Image (spheres, rainbow, N blue to C red):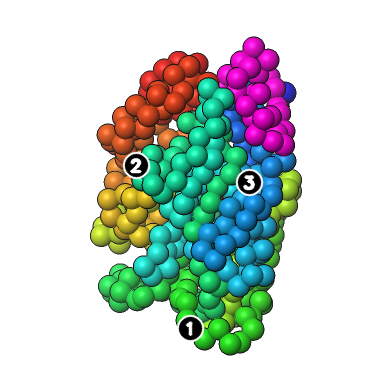
Amino acid sequence: MEKRNWFGDLLSHPKEVVTVHSVDDIVRVLTDSSKYPSPVRATGSNHSTTRCAVANEGTNIDMTGMNKIVSIGSDTVTAQAGALYIDVAKELEKQGLQFYVNVELGNLSIGSAACGGTKDSSMPGEWGQVASYVAGMKLVLPSGEVLEVTEAQPDLLQIMRSSYGLLGVIFEATFRIRPLQSMAVYHETFDLEDFAQSLPAIFGKPEAIMMYLWPFDNKITIEFRKYHDRNDRAPSRFVWWARNIVWKNFSPLFAFLVTKLVPIKGLRYFILDTFGILLRFSMNYILRSPHTSPTDQIIRYPEKSGMSRYTFSIWAFPEKSFLQTLRDYFQFCRAYYRSNRYRCNMLNVGYRIAQDQQSLFSYSFHEPVVSIDPVSTGDPGWKEFLLAYNEFCSDHGGVPLFNQSYGITQGQARKAFGDRLNTFEETRKRYDPQNRLFNHYFQELLSIGSE
Ligand SMILES: Cc1cc2nc3c(=O)[nH]c(=O)nc-3n(C[C@H](O)[C@H](O)[C@H](O)COP(=O)(O)OP(=O)(O)OC[C@H]3O[C@@H](n4cnc5c(N)ncnc54)[C@H](O)[C@@H]3O)c2cc1C
């Protein structure tokens, strides 16, 4: 059998694919290794850009059949693992509530959100990783036993929050939530040198900071977001609607078509750079409003990707040396283009994320970080570019995400996470001594065991 991730570039060849509808279904799969061979990998929406969910010769547990919201309280929501983040967020919004972290990918499944890497720019005083707000989860262990982990077991919960389905299959998770609050958003564009001058003031603002980066134009557009107490006006839906349409459909489709139809690279990138000028103008002058709903940031992507699909990769860098890293990255992109005639046909983005030790593989475990995420329609040369980018990132003290940073090596993972890999591996061996859930991808990265 062949399964592809949402973007379509990563293949998995499981012997069995089982769409589960109950806890008993999951128990049955995990306890019958003759019918359901190892490795067993659960999938939600299969949006990951790495091989984290690949189950070659093994079993894929498709969680999308378990998609109910179990309960909504004043400060928590509990949902089944296959529920989509956007569906839960919309239900919360109806009740005057919201998630803390409103990631752009609405197709993110609750199971993956609870145990995998995610990012959005941190609102002041808050974290930027969805799993950091997990208050509890229920999972089926490889032995078939059901385990509930709560905030009463902080060390175990910290490991579970970045367990990527290697300790068990999550069927239900509870997240901390908050009252819905009106949010202002606006954008400003800087030249690299202006940005360098203004950086202390920019990072000093009590606002969430996300960036659009244009290495070939030396430009940075910042999206600022902040909550405010005036909840008395209906939110403007236009700003996020327009951003979402452009980001989800128009921008990748345009990049795809220009890349396909304009083989002369000078002309191709002239057109794409001109499009970038238009985007920056629109962001600065149109995408701003003092009253929006945080939930509107979340995008529902089509179930099957089409011509407007895009992909990306991400590493996070220490905030204290980010300016130098950014300068070097712009140089790196130019040098790479000069020697390889390849550059990303979409822009790059970046997120400022607070220090966060809520999960073991948090990429901001030691300090606040800012990410650099190249984005592309995956045209020829993309994967090779990412391998060079990985080296650049690792050399600059970057930290990757196991589900969103393509092509990382064991050495890069070890450099980024150090002893935390050992801590995880000790726990993993306790919960999964037979390597029932351990696929080739994680074996290589953790560098222990064999498939
Ligand atoms: C177009 C696009 C836009 C994106 N935008 C963002 C963004 O703005 N912010 C962001 O943070 N990320 C973003 N992502 C990345 C995405 O959030 C992550 O890759 C996420 O893991 C995808 O969720 P999923 O449900 O598809 O997980 P999958 O890819 O299905 O699984 C991810 C991992 O979780 C494991 N897993 C899944 N379900 C379970 C379960 N029930 N129990 C145990 N383990 C499980 C899988 O085995 C795998 O290791 C984007 C991806 C794409 C393609």
Residue under label 1, please give it.
Answer: 229
Q: Residue at x 33, y 50 (%)?
A: 357
- Residue at image position (32%, 56%) is 355
Q: Is residue 43 located in the magenta-colored stretch of the structure?
A: no
Tag 3: residue type?
Gln
Question: What is the spatial separation of the Cα atoms under label 2 and label 1, in whole angstroms?
Answer: 35 Å
Q: Which mark is residue 80?
A: 3
Q: Which mark is residue 385?
A: none
Residue toward you, 310 or 53:
53
**In this orientation, which residue lies closer to the viewer: 281 or 238?**
238
| Alpha carbons under labels 3 and 2: distance apart | 23 Å
- Secondary element at tag 1: loop
Q: Which residues are magenta?
A: 15-39
* Quarter of the displayed picture in which ligand 1 can be seen: top right
Residue 443 location, quadrant: top left
Q: Amino acid at mark 2?
A: Asp
